[in-house]
Amino acid sequence: MQQRPTHAVTFVENHDSQPLQMLESVVEPWFKPLAYAIILLRQEGYPCVFYADYHGAEYEDWGRDGNRYKIFMPSHRWIIDKLLYARKYYAYGPQYDYFDHWSTIGWTRLGDEKHPQAMAVIMSDGAEGSKWMEVGKPNAKFIDLSEHIREPIYTNDKGWGEFRCQGGSVSVWIEQDKE
């Protein structure tokens, strides 16, 4: 990703890394929305959505210990659809990173000529959090596309806003058209 971001395929989980497979590296269900926000809404990489994360899966397979296990992987379709929408309409232009806290991170995308609306993404793997982030849109209204936070955020006259998220969650703040 760092050396050749245009050649990196990013994924959260795949058929080799899901439970009971050879390269098992399970991502906990609560963290998958955060992980998908990272691969779908940042400018680096080509994201790959795993079928079982989108549709869910139930199966039985043998573990390395010789025992048979039932596996249930919940669907994350609802949030993945929202993230794909944000990717299609808002994940454009310059990206500013705010990786200055151990459990709450964020970034903004400022839009481009064809997609002028901005987006701010903030997530926490701990307690609820907030960050002052620049979106380049003075006195603009932002709503949380993920619907975790109902109250809108308004930027100041310099295009900065204090964006929030719940604990163990991601919020994707998208700019609303002027009313």
Image: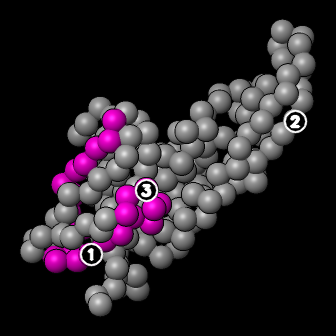
Residue 98 horizontal side relative to residue 57, left or right: left
What residue appears at the point 48 percent right and 68 percent down from the top-left corner?
86
- Give the mark nearest the N terminus, 2 or 1: 2
Location of mark 2 (residue): 59
Q: Is residue 26 visible?
A: yes
In the image, residue 84 lies at what x, y percent? 57, 66
Residue 149 horizontal side relative to residue 87, left or right: left
What residue appears at the point 45 percent right and 62 percent down from the top-left corner?
147
Q: Quadrant of residue 25?
A: top right
Q: Is residue 147 magenta?
A: yes
Is 126 or 64 nearer to us in this picture? 126
In the picture as drawn, the residue positioned furthest to the front comes out as 150
Per the rendering, the mark at residue 148 is: 3
Name the amino acid type tagged 1.
Lys
Q: Read off the magenta span.
A: 127-150
Name the amino acid type tagged 2.
Tyr
The answer for how far apart the CA atoms under marks 1 and 3 are is 16 Å
In the image, residue 7 lies at what x, y percent? 55, 53
Disc 1 crowd rating (10 Å Cα; few below 14, some 14-19, many 20+) is: some
Location of mark 1 (residue): 141
